[in-house]
């Protein structure tokens, strides 16, 4: 019985479904870097969760574009726009990303979920 429930639970995992879309996420991240160079594949995968696993690719792309815009605005809020390039990692990058997602959603729980998923998706598949 445990095995059946375990298999059922894994088949419904949105994180695993998003992980299966990594190739598409990499393409969307690449196009998103045209808008903002700090966008990572892990960001795009976490955005997939934010817009919903049932959303179509256009809605996902729209979320990536919005995120890129909000990253730029968050940098300016932290007085980093143009003066200090945003490193893809580190405490300043985390703060900018959190501000951008908070601006997109207005929901602290969604921000926390986004950051947790972003960290999870940044790890190679199979290590979590």
Image (spheres, helix red, strand yellow):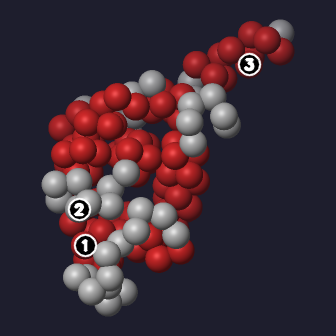
Say what secondary structure mark 2 lies in.
loop
Q: How many marks?
A: 3
Q: Residue at x 22, y 51 (%)?
A: 32
**Vertical side of 3 occupied by 9: above or below:** below
| Quadrant where the image shows the C terminus | top right
> Which mark is nearer the camera, 3 or 2?
2
Q: Single out the residue that lies furthest toward the bottom.
A: 79
Residue contact between numbered discs 1 and 2, judged by CB atoms under 8 Å: yes
Say what secondary structure mark 3 lies in.
helix
Q: Earlier in the sequence, mark 3 or mark 1?
A: 3
Say what secondary structure mark 1 lies in.
helix
Res. 47 visible in picture: no
> Which mark is nearer the camera, 3 or 1?
1
Residue contact between numbered discs 3 and 2, judged by CB atoms under 8 Å: no
Q: Earlier in the sequence, mark 1 or mark 2?
A: 2
> Rounded to the nearest whole Å, what is the CA distance between mark 3 and mark 2?
40 Å
Residue 16: where, in percent of width, then height?
A: 54, 28
User: Which residue carries the number 3 mark?
Assistant: 6
**Vertical side of 119 occupied by 49: above or below:** above
Q: Residue at x 23, y 62 (%)?
A: 36
Residue 77: where, in percent of width, then height?
A: 32, 86
Q: Residues within 10 Å of mark 3 (few under 14, many from 20)?
A: few
Q: Residues within 10 Å of mark 1 (few under 14, many from 20)?
A: many
Residue nearer the viewer, 16 or 23:
23
Q: Single out the residue that lies furthest toward the right.
A: 2
- For this view, does 114 lie left or right of residue 104? right
Q: Earlier in the sequence, mark 3 or mark 2?
A: 3
Res. 85 image quadrant = bottom left
User: Which residue carries the number 2 mark?
Assistant: 36
Residue nearer the viewer, 74 or 1:
74
User: Which residue carries the number 1 mark?
Assistant: 72
């Amino acid at each position: 019985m445990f095995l059946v429930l375990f298999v059922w639970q894994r088949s419904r995992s949105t994180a695993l479904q998003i992980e299966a879309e990594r190739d598409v996420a990499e393409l969307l991240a690449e196009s998103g870097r045209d808008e903002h160079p700090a966008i990572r594949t892990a960001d795009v995968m976490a955005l997939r969760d934010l817009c919903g696993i049932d959303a179509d690719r256009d809605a996902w792309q729209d979320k990536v574009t919005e995120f890129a815009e909000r990253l730029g605005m968050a940098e300016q809020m932290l007085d980093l726009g143009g003066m200090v390039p945003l490193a893809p990692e580190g405490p300043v990058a985390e703060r900018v990303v959190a501000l951008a997602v908070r601006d997109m959603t207005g929901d602290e729980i969604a921000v926390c979920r986004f950051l947790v998923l972003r960290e999870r998706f940044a790890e190679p598949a199979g290590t979590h």
